[in-house]
Amino acid sequence: MPSPPPAPAAPKPPQDKLSAPARALRKLGLARDIDLALHLPMRYVDETRITPVATLRDGDTAQVQGTVVECRVETRTRRQLVVRLADDSGEIVLRLVHFYPSNQKTLAVGQLVRARGEVRGGFFGREMVHPEFRAVTADAALPQALTPVYPSSAQLPQAYLRKAAASALGRAPLGELLPAEVLPGGLPTLREALQFLHHPSPNVPLTTLEDHSHPAWQRLKFEELLAQQLSQAQAQAARATLAAPVLSPRTSGLAAQLLATLPFTLTAAQQRVVAEIRTDLARPQPMHRLLQGDVGSGKTVVAALAAATAMGAGWQCALMAPTEILAEQHFRKLVQWLEPLGVQVAWLTGSRKGKARTAMVERVASGEAMLVVGTHAVIQHDVAFARLGLAIVDEQHRFGVAQRLALRQKLQEQALEPHLLMMSATPIPRTLAMTYFADLDVSTIDELPPGRTPIVTKVFADSRREQVVARIRDEVAQGKQVYWVCPLVEESEHLDLQNATATHAELGAALPGARVGLLHGRMAAAEKAAVMSLFTGGQMQLLVATTVIEVGVDVPNASLMVIEHAERFGLAQLHQLRGRVGRGEVASVCVLLYTPPLSATGKARLKAMAETNDGFEIARRDLDIRGPGEFMGARQSGDALLRFADLQADGALLQHARTVAPRLLREHPQAAAAHVQRWLAGRAEFLKA
């Protein structure tokens, strides 16, 4: 392999004195040599061979070399630079619609030029429009490796980035950190892998580079997965050194009282996860558990029993939900279950202000309020807990890392950490659980309470809208209730979507005997509460809403859900919305209205919804469609935590990394620490929240 071209002079602070390309490097996060070494090409260009002009075919992308025999400016429809290039076998035209005087100089008659582009038939024979080109000498050697094309920006020319990457690759600390025995067999060293991926030989099958199956790619992906597994294991070990309140259950305690007063019996799955949580709470180390279960599986009562265990031991509990509607649903249920047992429940949301809020904050600080339910307002700086023993986060994927950490830190002044229970109605597929949640204990409620009826899902084009309205008329006549979900509140110039306010007016006119309500995020909290109260109480037959009703709303009499422009919603969101019906004993239907034509992704989502009600299968398909970054929201860190590995394709590598990580930590702790630092640097903290 030829020696890399010299790099541009290393940029030096201050920032305002950096060149534009150097500033662009920093903006892309390419500040260190290792950053550039790991900034891999997105594709490659083959400049290792010259194709004779006579052998070119239309549609080929090829490189030619010849002498300029004509260079002229045409001014017919618009100014163009037209160049005739000749080699020993024939001629080809190079056509530049946009050009500069410097281009004319490079392409002067008699100049030897190397050009690369797509060949197409023109009026005067074959031509290349806007090819890449440069003047060369007769003895100019061809590259011995494919030319990399990197992810870049307008301010960062490929030539500059190629030089910077090649130079950084020579300087980056890429020595082997890992003992040979932990590596999968047959893989190159890290330095060999990176050198190859930046400058692969021209005879390598391009498919192995494009599908990332080449051994060089396998080495990078294994290193990345191992770093993540090590970081998760370190986080778990670090938590084992922390202290948490010991919340021992008492036979005649508050949790036992609550269980005795519930108007239903827990399912076997609920009993199992309650026991798992109770065991965790009795330990002197902080619990870090994810409670996952499908829509309607009964996670709230499990959370209530966990809270009762904490409060029965004399400690406060905080429950944080992402929206006021969901927080209020929790608040109503918990008040209904716990206030008769003497528990004071505080309510903290952004809409609660003034004296009412001050009074609530004082009750929390004094310890008078043992249970605090709310939104992000629970973690505001002026909210202090007397003795916070348990923090519960519902729909945890909707909160950022900093927000979850802030809730955990509400007890730090006592040198204790609260126990943390995170809940999600979006089940986590196994491969994600093994990576993004490897440091968590996971409890799964894998059965629904008895009495739930399966939901039938139907997919209709919006041309059948009148039939859907007729079905609503029938449901209302039978005393049942209906949701109609819209993606927008008002008209949008950019998206031609049926909006909630217009739909509310339209359905109100179509159903003169029914009470039709409107609910959206821009309404005041009091207005939202009034509308929900009417619908929950059965006085309102049809609720037109945006996705504020996605989670938490529980109206057993609701038997029909219509989702407008369903193709615009994510699969997990559609499943959550569908879960608002089928919560009682009445047969329920979810109608997905779409506007054709559907994209491939839209078709896949609607097909999945029609074929299954299983949240775990929905999650698996969602992961297939969107990939782990979008599925997880990159764990709300702002950065994807896996750059190279693919959880679907790299299951074997993941399993190997998962197997060897504990051994590496145990037998080679310094190598493990160095490996995590190389790959995760400042991002490891995001894996711990």
Image (spheres, grey):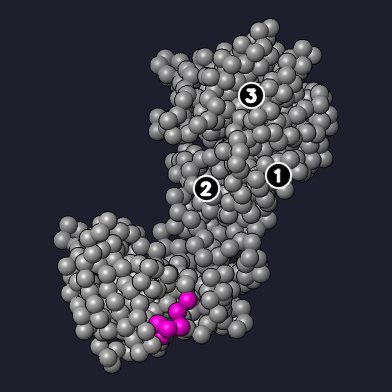
Please say if 294 is above or below 263: below
Q: Which residue is mark 2?
A: 633
Q: Report the front residue among 37 and 95.
A: 95
Q: Position of residue 563 (x, y in %)?
A: 64, 30
- In this figure, which residue is indicated by the disc labeled 1? 607
At which x and y percent is residue 480?
A: 75, 17
Label ID, residue 147? none
Q: Amino acid at mark 1?
A: Lys
Question: Going 44% across and 50% down the picture, which residue do you hit?
Answer: 638
Please give the residue where the numbered disc 3 appears in the rendered image. Answer: 484
Crowding near the residue tagged with mark 3, few <14, some 14–19, many ≥20 C-alpha atoms within 10 Å: many
Instruction: Mark 3 vs mark 2: give the one in front.
Output: 3
Q: Residues within 10 Å of mark 1 (few under 14, many from 20)?
A: some
1 or 2: tag closer to the N-terminus = 1
- Residue 328, placed above or below residue 120: above
Q: Going by the image, does 364 lie left or right of 19?
A: right
104 over 231 or under it: above or below: below
53 in magenta: yes
Q: Which residues are magenta?
A: 52-57
Front residue (pair 165, 190):
165
Bin the neighbour count of mark 2 within 10 Å (Cα to Cα): few under 14, some 14-19, many 20 and up.
some
In the image, 399 versus 111, the foreground residue is: 111
Residue 543: name its quadrant. top right
Labelled pair 3, 2 in contact (Cβ < 8 Å)? no
